[in-house]
Structures are given as structure tokens and as C-alpha cells.
Image (spheres, rainbow, N blue to C red):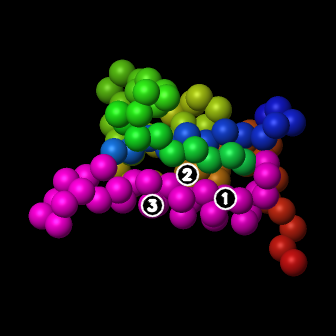
Amino acid sequence: MSTAGAFVAIVGAPIACADGVKDTWRELAGWFAEQLHARYDDQVRVTYFDLFDPACPPLPPDGQLPLVTIDGETVISGGKLAMPVIRQRLEALGVKPMPRK
């Protein structure tokens, strides 16, 4: 891991439903960012990308939403966002949890 820390990218898209359009993936990505910051402080940066945003990184072949990459490596493709999967990969890269106060 570089001294700049790990970069977590979460890619999702708005979801159309009977009540209109919901931005559930963006909301979940915000929650994940808060949780990761609480555990790792500034060692981890989390950015949410809407699939239709020009800045969105390209999806890998057969990639599905939600897509989570850490430093460019796909760790979740489709299904659910899973904090244990993300934490396991971060810690395998050398990101250390902050001591609890």
C-alpha cells in the first residue's frame, strides 16, 4: 500500500421504483465511507461513482452493480455491498485499523 492509503471506488446507479428514483447505492456508499473512516481514519478514501457519470471508471468484463474496487482491483461485483469483504482486502493490503479509544 502506498503512503497515500487505499482508494475504494463504489459504482452504482439510481434505481427507478414506484415512488420515483432512489439513489440507494449513493446513500449506502456514504454510510460505508463513514464506517471505513471511523475504522481506518485517513488511510482509506472512498468515492462513489454513478454508472452514468463521465468520471466513472470502466466496468470490467461481466462486471455488475454494485461494483467495488480497491486500488483498481475488483472485490465486489453484483450482489450486496459487504463490509467484511472490503475490510479483509484493505487489511491484506496493509491498512491497519486505528486503535480504539
Q: Nearer the viewer, residue 91 or 28?
A: 28
Alpha carbon separation for disc pair 2 and 1: 12 Å
State the residue lying farthest toward the bottom. Answer: 101
Q: Nearer the viewer, residue 84 or 23?
A: 23
**Point 50% across, 55% down: residue:** 29
Q: Amino acid at mark 1?
A: Leu
Q: What amino acid is at disc 2? A: Val
Q: Identify the element where label 1 is drawn.
A: helix
**Side of 63 relative to 56 (left or right):** left
Q: Residue at 87% x, 68% y: name it.
A: 99
Is 79 left, or right, of 8 in this rendering?
Answer: left
Determine the CA span between mark 3 and mark 2.
Answer: 19 Å
CA gap between label 1 and label 3 equals 14 Å
Image height of 19 relative to 7, above or below? below
Pair 1/3: label in front? 3
Residue indicated by mark 1:
36
- What number is the disc on residue 85? 2
- The numbered mark, 3 or 2, whose residue comes first in the sequence reads 3
Labels 1 and 3: the sequence-earlier one: 3
24 magenta-colored: yes
Residue 79 or 13: which is nearer the viewer?
13
Vertically, is 17 above or below 62? below
Q: Residue 21 in magenta?
A: yes
- Residues shaded magenta: 14-43
Chief secondary structure of the magenta span? helix
Locate residue 20, reporting x and y percent.
19, 60
Query: Is tag 2's residue or tag 1's residue first in the polypeptide sequence?
Result: 1
Q: Nearer the viewer, residue 76 or 34?
A: 34
Q: Are marks 1 and 3 in contact (CB under 8 Å)?
A: no
Q: Which residue is labeled 3 in the image?
A: 27
Q: Secondary structure at mark 3?
A: helix
